[in-house]
Image (cartoon, grey):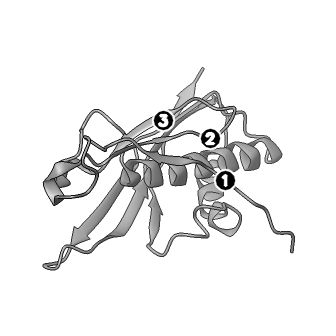
Amino acid sequence: MAEHDYTARVVWTGNRGQGTVTYKGYDRTWNIETPGKPVVHCSNDPLLGGDPSLHNPEDLLIAALSSCHMLWYLHLASDAGIAVQSYQDDPLAVGETDKAGASRFLRATLRPQITVPEGTDLARADALHHEIHKTCFIARSVNFPVAYKARYKVQA
C-alpha cells in the first residue's frame, strides 16, 4: 500500500474585530487557499446562519463524492469501450441533526445523467456504477450508504 498526502489551507475570514468574544460576534466564513489553485470562499450551512451563496462543508463533501464517482466512471467506461459523450450529476445527500445539535449524513444518492452513442450496452454502462465503490477514494472513505440512480440519454 502506498500512502498519499493531501493538503489544503483553510483560513477563517469571519473575525469582525473582536474574534470569538461572543458567539454571535463572528462570521462562520473561511477560504480554502490551496497554493497554486483558485480560492474557494465558504460559509457554514444556511440552516446554521451561513451565507447561502457560498459553499459549505456539506456541499463540498457531496461534490467530492460525486466528482470522484464521475472520474472513476469515465475511466471504467473508457476501459469497457463505452464512449461517454456527456456526464452531469445532481447528487442528493440526506442528513439529520439530533436534539443536541450534532449532525451527520444518513445517505447519498448520485443521480448522473449520462449521454452515450446509439448502440451502447446500457446494462453494461449501468453496471459500472456498482464497481466504483471498490476504487473511489471518497466513496471508500465515507461512512454512509451511497446509491446510484443513473439516467441515460442515447445520442444518434
- Circle 3/circle 2 CB separation < 8 Å: no
| Three-letter code for the amino acid on which mark 1 is drawn | Thr
The vertical placement of 129 against 38, above or below, is below
Residue nearer the viewer, 123 or 129:
129
State the image coordinates of residue 73 (x, y, percent, origin top left).
66, 48
Mark pair 2, 1: CA separation: 7 Å
Which residue in the structure is indicated by mark 1? 7
Check disc 3 and report its element: helix, strand or loop: strand
Q: CA distance from mark 1 to mark 3?
A: 14 Å
Q: Amino acid at mark 3?
A: Val
Residue at 69%, 50% in the rendered image: 72
Q: Going from the N terminus, do you reach mark 1 or mark 3 first?
A: 1
Residue at the image point whose x is 70% and y is 56% from the top: 6
Quadrant location of the N terminus?
bottom right
Q: Nearer the viewer, residue 33 or 47?
A: 33
Task: Quickly name the residue at label 2.
Answer: 34
Which residue in the structure is indicated by mark 3?
40
User: Where residue 56 appears, x then y in whole percent?
Assistant: 36, 47
